[in-house]
Amino acid sequence: MVLDLNIIKSKFGKQVLNNYFGIDFTERIPVADLPQAAQPLTSSASQVSALPAAKQEKPAPKNKSSPGNGSFDPFKTDGETRSVISFPPVGVREVLQPPSVSPAISPYDLTQYLRNCSVVGEEANGILLTVSLSSGMHTILEGESGSGKSHLMQAVLSLFPKSEVCTVEQVSGQAIWHFADQLNQARIVYFPELQKVVADRNRKHAGIVELMKSIAEGKDASRMVTNTSHDGVDTYCISKEKTLVATLATENDFVYDREFQRRFLFLNTDASPQHIREIIDHKVTDRIAATLSSRYDPLEERLSSRVTELGHRDDLYVLNPFLPYLRRSFPNSSKTQAYLEHYLNLFEAWGKFFHDDHQQISLYGKTFVLLNLEDVYHVYSAYHDSFLRTLESFSGEQALHFSPDWKTCFLEGVSVANTLISVGDGTDRSVLGQEYPQLIAAWRDAQMEGSSIYARSYSTGERFILADLRQPAPAALSHTHSSYVTPITDPARMLPAYCEHHDTT
C-alpha cells in the first residue's frame, strides 16, 4: 500500500512529513514505513483517518516517569478505564490528512448573519436555534408577545432551502391530514403561534397536538379520516423523518401540557424592558440611514451550505470529554432525567455545526469530533439558564446555581479524554487515549496558548482568556464529585510542571 501523493502535495502535507516524520515528501512512501510514534500535532484542524485493516497489537504501557524527568506528562493519570460512549468497531491503520481549505464557520459568523437580518439581542438564541434545527432537534421558541420570536425564527429558517420548510397555520387537526404529502416532503415543519393549538379548549386542533407528540417521540403519525366524497375512510401517514419547530407566546392564562413539553427543546426570548428598548432604538436608527441590501451575501451562502450539508450527513459523531465535570450542574431529580436528553443533544449539535477546525478521527466511515472547552462554554452560557427555567416550570422548585470553574473542567476533560473516551462494540473497544495518544495530545495542545485557554466571544468576535492554568486550583468543590469520573490525582502538583514546559513566554 502506498501513500497517495495527491494528499501530501499541499503545504500542510510537506510540513507534516518534514517536521514531524522526517520523510522526504517527493518519494512514494509505503504507509507501513511511516513512524509509529509521531510528536503531538499543533494544528487545530488536523484529522486522523483510520482505514479498515487487521487490528494491531496495543502498544506496551510506558514506564511511569517522575515529575523531575523531561518525559513527565502532567495530564497522565492512573485508574480504571471505563467506556463512556459506544460506537461502531474501529479500524487501526492511520493516515494523516490535511484540513479543509474552506474557512471554518464560527459562532460569530452566525451572530453577524443574524444582525444583518436585524435581529437584536437574541444572537445566543439564534445560534442555538440554527444549531438545533440543523441536527434535527425538535425545538420551540417561547416568550412574551412582541419579544421578537417570529422575526428570529424567520431569519433562521431563511438559511434552509425553501423546499425543505413547510409552514402550518390556520388549519384544523382534521384538515392537516389532507396535507400529508406536502408534510412528508419537508425536512422542517414550522408551527407559528403554537399557543393557539396547545391551549385550544374546544379541541379543534387536538389532532395537531397528537401528530406533534408522535413525531417528537420518533414515531410515524397516522390517522384514518372519513372521506365525504365516497363511502369509507382514507388512511394518512406522516413520516417521523422531519424536524418540528414552533413559536409559542406565553400569555398570562397559558397552561403547559407537561407531556407535550418534555418532548421539545425550549428556548426563551428576552422580554425585559431593556431588550424592548434596544429593539425600538434599532428600528429608529435603521430608518435614519438607508441601507441597500446586497443581492449576494457570501456569509449567508456559507451558512446555508452548512445547514444543507448537515441534513444529508449521518456520519458525524461528537465526543464530549467535559460532560462528567458538567454533571455537577445537573439537579438530581426525575424532571432532570426527563429533560436532560435535549441538553446533551445540544452539545452534539454544536459540535457538528462547528466541526471544521476541531480534532477529528475517521473510523470505519464515521467521523468523530472532539469538543473543545470553548464549545462547552458557549453552550453552557447560552442555554443553561433556559434549562433550569424549564425544570422549574416542571416542578415549581428553584434549582441551585452552579458556577463552573473552567480550568478544572479542562483538566478533568483531558483526564477523561485520555482514560475514558472509547469507541467500539461490546466486545472490541478502544480507548482513544491509548490507541491514538497523538490525537488527544493534538486536541489538548491546540486549545492552549502558553498556560492559557482562549475563547472567542460569539457577540463581539474578540478573544478572551477562558481559563488560566497558572491560577491556583480550588481547594475544594462544594458540589459532589461524580462517581464515574476519574479525577486528576493532584492538579496543584501537576500545574507547575506543565506550565513550565508549555509557557511560550
Image (spheres, rainbow, N blue to C red):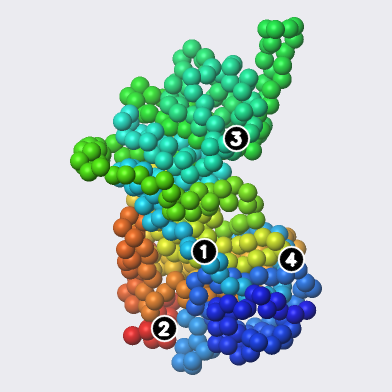
Q: Earlier in the sequence, mark 3 or mark 2?
A: 3
Q: Image height check: is 98 above or below 126?
A: below
Secondary element at tag 2: helix
CA separation in Å, label 1 and label 4? 36 Å
Q: Earlier in the sequence, mark 4 or mark 3?
A: 3
Specify whether residue 390 is in view: no
Secondary element at tag 1: loop
Q: Earlier in the sequence, mark 4 or mark 2?
A: 4
* Discs 1, 2 touching: Cβ within 8 Å: no
If the image is split into quadrants, where does the N terminus sit?
Answer: bottom right
Secondary element at tag 3: loop
Amino acid carrying mark 1 in the image: Ser
Going 46% across and 92% down the picture, which residue do you hit? 68
Amino acid carrying mark 4 in the image: Asp
Q: Which mark is residue 102?
A: 1
Secondary element at tag 4: loop
Amino acid carrying mark 2 in the image: His
CA separation in Å, label 3 and label 2? 51 Å
Amino acid carrying mark 3 in the image: Ala
Left or right of 321 in this view: 24: right
Q: Image height check: is 194 above or below 414?
A: above
Q: Which residue is mark 2?
A: 502
Which percent across, then down, holds residue 208?
A: 55, 23
* Discs 1, 4 touching: Cβ within 8 Å: no
Q: Which residue is mark 3?
A: 186
Which percent across, then down, holds residue 294?
A: 38, 47
* Discs 4, 2 touching: Cβ within 8 Å: no
Q: Which residue is mark 4?
A: 428
* Discs 3, 1 touching: Cβ within 8 Å: no
Q: Earlier in the sequence, mark 1 or mark 2?
A: 1
Name the front one of labels 3 and 1.
1
Left or right of 252 in this view: 232: right
